[in-house]
Image: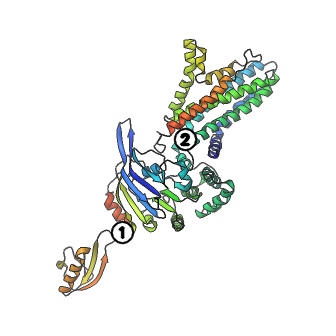
Amino acid sequence: MKTALEFDHTVKEYSSLFPRRRVRALDDFCLSVEPGEIFGFLGPNGAGKTTAIHLAMGFMRPTDGGGHLLGKPFGNAAAHRRVGFLPENVAMYPRRAEELVRFYGALNGMAPADLRTRAAEVLTLVGLQERRNGNVSKFSRGMVQGVGLAQAIVNDPELLILDEPTSALDPASRVAVRELLLRMRAAGKTIFLSSHLLSEVELVCDRVAVLHRGRLVRVGKIADLLESTKRADIVARGIKPAAFPDAKAQDGVVVFSTSTADQRAALERVWQLGGEVVSVNPQRLSLEQIFLELTGTSKPDRDGGTQ
Amino acid sequence: MRPVLLIAVNFVREQRWPILVLLLWVLLLAFLGLMTNKAREGEDLLFVFKQVALYVVAFSVFFGSSAIYNDRRSRRILSILSKDVERGEYLSGLVLGIAIASAIYCFALGLTGSWTLGEAGFAVRQMWFLMLGLVAACSLAGTVALMFSTFLNPFFAAGATAVAMGLPPALSLGLHVAELSYLIPVYPLAATVLKSSFSPHERMSWFPIALAFLETLLFWMLSAKIFSYVDIAVSVD
């Protein structure tokens, strides 16, 4: 089966004349997104996420390498007929919401008769059915983002590329978007989701990739990443904390951690010392912890990105 | 073809205020036509008509030089080009939009001119011929500006367009070779309007009009080629 989206050793450099400098926004970037998955694309500001998305959509040319979008090389406009795209900080022409959605649908070759019903349908999906005749110029940022999402899905795309789709949405709208994405995945669609909202990503994505300084630093299934520490927390009673390095006494029990390789030996030692094992839990990091660990973003990131 | 038409109509809608402002000049001509004795003050009306006619060429340069910039700065271009729209089609839409905008103006001016100057003895056929020439000049001027704006900001694109349009007549004058002014025939077409009179001496020529439309096509092709290499998502400033 063909990949939905594929980056093949993609390199993108930005250069400026005054001052003369080159910034490598993407460096030998390889990634494959399989059909039917929700793929989370993570990285700090300036990591190159938006650059990668813009390359995939053909808004830019790669300095080296390339990639494929639904089997077609990046920049192939015909492939866009099967793609939905929501840019970061979406901007819209000052028109009625329904008119705008129909305009974008028509650009994708949809027939006017189909568009009449489809535009109303997608605006209902994003919760704007009652504002469909309102002018977008008078909408809040969150509502504009909703219209942006509606125009992205009006053509019932096979692949949906979303750049920060929920950044301006209120919690209720976020839940609605999350449900929409899950419904689309259930219908066999592929979703490529770039987001800073790690809790959102953790909830909906099957796989994630973490990009840092233009390089892919981690890619994998969410479940694997969260359990990737290979350590376990052991709670025991009836032993002294000094029996294990870094063990702490808490509420009458002793808590310590060990690598999964040494777990069996640690448990036997507890029993040898006359103790009792209360619990053994594999350590799970949150996506946020993994993200911070991989990207070291406790301090401000470099500038020069295109986010 | 449908995306081209959609983009063109969208462009005209976006530029409706400048077009309306431009149409105020036509309204001024109509007002003067109402208030003056057309037979006696026909020459004055013709002078105003010539002035008002040439404004649209300047506006076309303004439309052409700022169209891509506006869409890139607002990032609206991303939503358009994320659809099944080639960059060349996007530019075609803008060129057609500029042509439609100038045609709307020229049609209004032609109607008003036929009424005011026609009653003063100006040949109506000549009037519509001038308007067609003006639309051709606007399409070409707008497309040249659009071509420069694919890689320059609007200010420099407008300046470069002025130089490109002014250079051929300047060379023609300096080298005493009249044909040179037809390299980019905006000036010859504008000059036809400026030289128009109640008793025209020269035969009206279709050559600069046809050449202007042909060059519009050539400059559009050049624009599309240049624009295909432009990173449109990169900040335009």
Instruction: From the viewer's side, name the closer residue of B223 and B16.
Output: B223
**Res. A192 mark:** none
Q: CA distance from mark 1 to mark 2?
A: 45 Å
Q: Is residue B57 left or right of residue A170?
A: right
Residue lying at 60% horizontally and 15% vertically, measured from the top left: B178
Q: Quadrant of the N terminus of chain B?
A: top right
Residue A243, visible in the rendered structure: yes
Coloring scheme used: rainbow
Residue A271's quadrant in the figure? bottom left
Chain bearing mark 1: A
**Res. B70 mark:** 2
Q: Residues within 10 Å of mark 1 (few under 14, many from 20)?
A: few
Residue lying at 27% horizontally and 79% vertically, measured from the top left: A234
Q: Residues within 10 Å of mark 2 (few under 14, many from 20)?
A: some
Residue located beneath label 1 in the image: A224
Residue lying at 67% horizontally and 58% vertically, measured from the top left: A114
In terms of secondary structure, where does tag 2 sit? helix
